[in-house]
Image (tube, grey):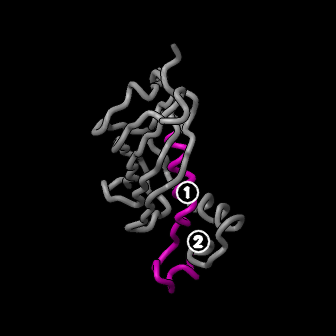
Amino acid sequence: MPKPLLYLEDFSPGQTFASGSVIVDADAIKAYARQFDPQPFHLDEAAAAGTFFKGLAASGWHTVSMTMRLLVDGGLPIAGGIIGAGVDEIRWPRPTRPGDTLRLHSEVLEVRPSKSRPDQGLMKVRTTVLNQNDEPVQIMVSNLVVPRRPA
């Protein structure tokens, strides 16, 4: 059953949201890398073994893309969709590896109505992407445009 969609008035600092999960596949890592980040540590297990990562690792941008998918699939049920107004911070404390099962934990940090657009506001959210060992593979603080509840 889908989560109800939420408006700015439904959010408050400290509120948390979780997502479903996605299993990271080696073929998907390589396909993404071929198109967007063609470096040896994203493309080939043997070549990756001798690099900084000591094995195949997903591009950080691939991890961001999987994060977006999990957010859209119910990790952050914002009415009107997830509309970014910028990212304050993004970190990848450890690599995303083939076979990892990723899930999200999002925490609302700030909610404020827009001064110039009465039909919307801004929300600052920290989204931590965890692997199957509850280790963070990505931490992102983003600013989102959120509609206000219609009158």
Q: Position of residue 15 (x, y in %)?
A: 31, 35
Q: Is residue 98 above or below residue 1?
A: below
Q: Residue at x 41, y 45 (%)?
A: 124
Q: Position of residue 61 (x, y in %)?
A: 57, 61
Magenta-colored span: 45-71
Quickly name the residue at label 2. Answer: 42
Q: Secondary structure at mark 1?
A: loop
Q: Position of residue 53 (x, y in %)?
A: 46, 78
Quickly name the residue at label 1. Answer: 25
Q: Residue 11 versus residue 51: which sits nearer the camera?
A: 11
Q: Which mark is residue 33?
A: none
Q: Position of residue 116 (x, y in %)?
A: 54, 35
Q: Residue at x 67, y 73 (%)?
A: 38
What's the CA distance linking mark 1 and mark 2? 12 Å
Main SS of residues in magenta: helix
Which amino acid type is shown beneath numbered disc 2? His
